[in-house]
Every structure is written in C-alpha cells, then in structure tokens.
Image: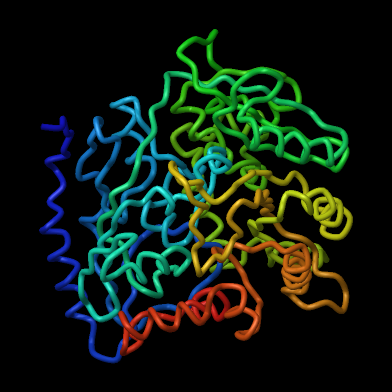
Amino acid sequence: MRAERVDHRVDHDGAVDLLRRSYAAVPPGETVRLAKRTSNLFRPRSAPSAPGLDVSGLGGVIGVDPVARTADVQGMCTYENLVDATLAHGLMPLVVPQLRTITLGGAVTGLGIESTSFRHGLPHESVLELDVLTGAGEIVACRPDGEHADLFAAFPNSLGSLGYATRLRIELQPVRRYVATRNVRFTRLEELTDAIGEVVAKGTWDGEPVDAMDGVMFSPGEAYLVLARFTDDAPRPSDYTGQDIYYRSLRRRPRDWLTTYDYLWRWDTDWFWCSAAFGVQHPVVRRLWPTRLRRSDVYHRIVRLENRYRVSARIDRLRGQPDRERVVQDVEIPLEGTADFLRWFAREVRMSPVWLCPLRLREPAGPGSARAWPLYPMRPGQTYVNIGFWGTVPIAEGAADGDVNRTIERAVSEAGGHKSLYSDAYYDREEFDRLYGGGTWRAVKDRYDPDDRLTGLYEKAVARR
C-alpha cells in the first residue's frame, strides 16, 4: 500500500455538494460565475448580476502520495498552501508560478510559468486528471484519453469559459533543502539567447547542472540569467523578505543561495519589482511596512482599489501629468526572435526591467513529441522566452488608451509569439479565434455548455465580461 498524507480537514465531497447547490441557485438564463474574493487577473470585469458559485470549501490539498509523487488538490487551492503540503515530503509541483495566491485551477485554466518551465513546460502539462464543473452543471472526470479527452485538451487557457476545476491530480518532483544560483551577466542579447539554447540542449552551463532558469533585462546592454540548481549544501542563505530586495541582488551577487521555500517565493515579496510603485522599496517605508504585508496579493488589492477609485490618476491630472496606459503583459517569443523583440521593446515601449523565462512544451518520458494544446498553440520542440512587463506608460498626445498594448500585440504576432490573456487584450474576434483555437473552443463549448451559461473566452479576455 502506498503511503499517503491526507488532509482530513478537507471535506471534498461536501465542498462539491455545496458547489452544486450554489449552481442550482443561479437563476436560469443568468451567467454562472465564481464567487471568490481574490484574483490575479489584471483586467477589470463587469459586475455580476446573480449570486456566484460557492467555492469556499475547495481551497485545500486532499492528499499527497510521496511514493507515486502525485497530489490530489482542490481547484481553488493556492500554490502557497500546495507548496506547504508537498515540501513536507521533499516534493514540489513541477512548475510553481511565482505568486503565492495563484491557484492551481487558475494556473491550469489560465496558464502559468516559472523557472522550471524550460524542463517541465506549463502547469497543465503535469495534470494527470481533473474533475470539472461544466456550464451544464455536471461534474466531469477528464483524462488525456477517453470520453472527455476533448475537454482535458481544451481546458488550458479556457479561463473558466468551459468550466471550473474542482479536483486535479498532478505530478510532483523531488527537491532539496536549498537552491544555489548563478547570476550570469550578458552585455549582448544574442549571447544571452545562445546561453538559453545551450542550457536547454545540455541541461548544464559551464559544467554545472541547471534545474531552473529565468532572468531579468535591465537594458539591452545589461541582462542576467539566473541559473539555479537544487542542493543540500549551502552557506548561510540569503533572505529577501526583509530589507534586501531580490531583483537588485542580481547585479551585485554572482552566486547566491536560498532555501527552496524562499526561492519559490523570491519574486512574491516585492511583486517582482512592482512594489516600488507603493514606496515599499524605500528603506524607511520598508522598515515600517510589516513583513507579513509584503506580498503580491496585498499589492494587488491596492491596485484594485486604484482601478475603482482612480485616486492616483486624479492626483496626476491635478499636477498636469498625462493619463497613463496600463501595460501589464506576459508574452512568449520564439528564442531566435527574442533578442530583436527585446531591442524593439526597449526602444518603443521603454519599460524596464522585464522578466525573462525560457519555456518549452514538456517532452514525453518515452518516444514521441511534446503534446500540443489547442487553445494556446505553441509548437512542440520550439524554445520560447516568456517576457513579462508590468507597469504603465504615459498616453501620448493624440493617442488613445490601449494603443501601446495594440502595438505590442502586433509585434508579438509578427514575431510568431503568443500573449497570455490574464490582462488587457484588444484583438478582434476573427484574429482572436485564429490565435487561440477558436474552432476547437466552440466545439467543446457546444458539448459541455450548450446553453452558454458560462461567459465566453473572447467575452472574458477582450470584452472584460
């Protein structure tokens, strides 16, 4: 018999029953939506007119099997809680997105990425099976093959338009106590992309193994790859939850060590570098701002309040400052076009720093090619670099809000890349369907949500419904 850790506080059957009853309470003809307090989306949405689905009991870990290296997890479980459960067994999910309150179900239906993605792809690629509440109110068990293989394949990047995951079984990987990093500086972007290609091909750099890889570009002449490996040996590890700020350390520390736990959440304390917008990186403010409140979800709540009340925007107008456009995006660019895109971005958009995270679709353990996913059609065997940039830019005189984002969308398409849909999008429907598997989505939607109870993918991503 396999040893299995079960969280007996999780009444999964009871939580699913509560979910079903809340679905039944939504009046016929009303749109079905989740009732949840937090979100990692960056686009405003219209207010619901009916009660949402009660997912309050779906935030736990059902069980961890350390022998099979799998976990059964409820859909609304945050990665923070999931990591706490798996690290107790010396295990972690194959990919742990960088922000604590991203949920497993959210990362699968909305995509996620992190520094292990050059080896393990995206979070949905480690899902072995999942249970989905469909728009028709049914709980469907989905696997890569069988009766509901179409929903299994189309669920990633469907953003809740095809249903909501109630339970997922995922693969886990073994880890060690610490992570050792090398922060390698590059002054030419082609040298950086060559290094990414070498690490992907060999799994090593300069004779040392690489288990995880991401990076930061401060300018086209100053970029860093962070090459990480798991280890049980380390000098005193660094702590970036206090006065030190992680992204700044890349410039001054060629080598570094963190506990595995702190490595997984190294970006969360300062929301990468976006905490600067709230003054949290100022030494005095940082000492006064409680450590427990230096978290991405706290900053995100502040942003939602600003989006609602527009206090900063009003102050800027009183000061005679131009209105600003939100430019918060993650885009995947093929490796061979990454240097050119980064130079274009630095020249035309002029936001800095930007995050760099190489990724590939996950290669199978045996013979065969990587599986493609229809609603986010990346090419098997192709290395991409996720480029993340998050901030605002002034709206030029005569320009409209959204013009910079539209320009970025065109540049991404011209580079053969893709754009994640957690933030603002401006595509027309024809282009959107071409880029995001519209034909497949419609066929699956018609089967599992024939009455269109769930908001459509285009309506969510572009129309902000």
Residue at 57% from the left image edge and 77% from the top image edge: 462
Residue at 32% from the left image edge and 51% from the top image edge: 128
Determine whether 255 is above or below 382 in the image.
above
Determine whether 416 is above or below 6 in the image.
below
Q: Is residue 426 visible?
A: yes
Q: Nearer the viewer, residue 308 or 218?
A: 218
Determine whether 355 is above or below 432 in the image.
above
Label count reads 0
Q: Nearer the viewer, residue 360 or 277?
A: 360
Give percent across and percent down for residue 206.
Answer: 71, 20
Q: Nearer the viewer, residue 36 or 456?
A: 456
Quarter that holds the N terminus: top left
Give percent across and percent down for residue 463.
Answer: 55, 81
Determine whether 157 is above or below 248 in the image.
below
The colour mode here is rainbow
Q: Is residue 445 left or right of residue 385?
A: left
Residue at 61% from the left image edge and 41% from the top image edge: 272
Residue at 49% from the left image edge and 41% from the top image edge: 295
Q: Is residue 185 left or right of residue 356?
A: right
Q: Is residue 251 left or right of residue 234?
A: right
